[in-house]
């Protein structure tokens, strides 16, 4: 199954449109958003419309949390926006993969955990808590705004400049770079190939 992965959109409509067009051309079967749709709210309605039209599913991020769970804040946004935002979950397991905006050992239903950041998982203890948090072989996150991949043995020498084969007998934690900086990915669960895309954005 081909999954189209987008995260940290922050209402960047131009690149989101490019990504969704590429997903359609590549015959992606499911678009998954890994959180942080919101920036200032000025284009969140259009962001949600595009994702809803693409049949996207996904999880909320630290910037989305209030809009997804706070009834008072929701009154400030049109119903169509809420229709999509309220479908977002704290975590998602789909096609054998685990999706959460932050590292999977954190609790995405706590705002403190959603904003937590202690640098990349470059220490055995950091990696251990990630891989102990779920039994899924492949875990995807956002939040870092950069490409990163790790196995239980350590960080991989990979920066999103080329495809990455996720070996079937190995476990992986992968962060997808931010679409607001021009990045997104396609993951084929049958071939185990993760293909990153990095668009050049206008200055």
Image: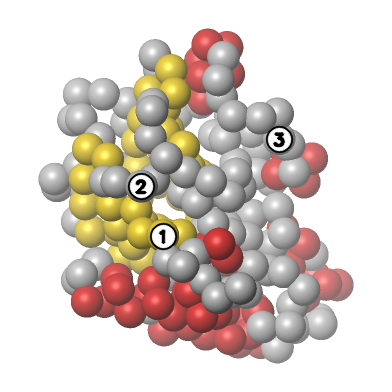
Give the quarter of the image for residue 168. Answer: top left
Residue depth check, mark 3 versus mark 2: number of the one nearer the observer: 2
Res 125 label: none
Q: How many marks?
A: 3
Indicate which disc, 3 or 2, sits on the residue closer to the N terminus.
3
**Residue drawn where x is 52% and y is 85% of the image:** 49
Residue 183 point in image, percent of width and height: 46, 59
Res 198 label: 1
Q: Mark 2 highlights which residue?
A: 161
Q: Mark 3 highlights which residue?
A: 117
Contact (CB < 8 A) between labels 3 and 1? no
**Horizontal side of residue 77 vs 19, given as left or right:** right
Callout 1: SS:
strand
Indicate which disc, 3 or 1, sits on the residue closer to the N terminus.
3
**Residue drawn where x is 32% and y is 26% of the image:** 171
Q: Quadrant of the N terminus?
A: bottom left
Can residue 58 be seen at all in this image of the molecule? no
**Residue drawn where x is 51% and y is 19% of the image:** 127
Label 2 crowding class (10 Å Cα cut-off): few <14, some 14-19, many 20+?
Answer: few
Disc 3 and disc 1: Cα gap in Å?
24 Å
Name the residue at the right extreme: 72
Residue 133 point in image, percent of width and height: 51, 26
């Amino acid at each position: 199954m081909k999954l189209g992965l987008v995260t940290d959109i922050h209402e960047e409509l131009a690149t989101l449109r490019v990504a969704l067009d590429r997903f359609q051309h590549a015959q992606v079967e499911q678009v998954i958003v890994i959180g942080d749709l919101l920036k200032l709210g000025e284009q969140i309605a259009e962001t949600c419309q595009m994702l809803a039209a693409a049949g996207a599913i996904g999880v909320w991020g630290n910037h989305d949390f209030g809009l997804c769970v706070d009834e008072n804040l929701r009154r400030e946004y049109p119903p169509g926006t809420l229709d999509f935002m309220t479908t977002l979950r704290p975590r998602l397991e789909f096609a054998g993969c685990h999706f959460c905006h932050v590292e999977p050992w954190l609790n995405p239903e706590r705002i403190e955990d959603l904003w937590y950041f202690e640098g990349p998982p470059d220490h055995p203890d950091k990696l251990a808590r990630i891989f102990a948090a779920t039994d899924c072989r492949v875990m995807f996150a956002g939040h870092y705004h950069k490409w990163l991949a790790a196995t239980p043995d350590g960080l991989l020498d990979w920066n999103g400049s080329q495809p990455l084969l996720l070996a079937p007998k190995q476990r992986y934690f992968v962060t997808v770079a931010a679409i607001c900086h021009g990045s997104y990915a396609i993951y084929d669960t049958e071939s185990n190939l993760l293909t990153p895309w990095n668009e050049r954005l206008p200055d």
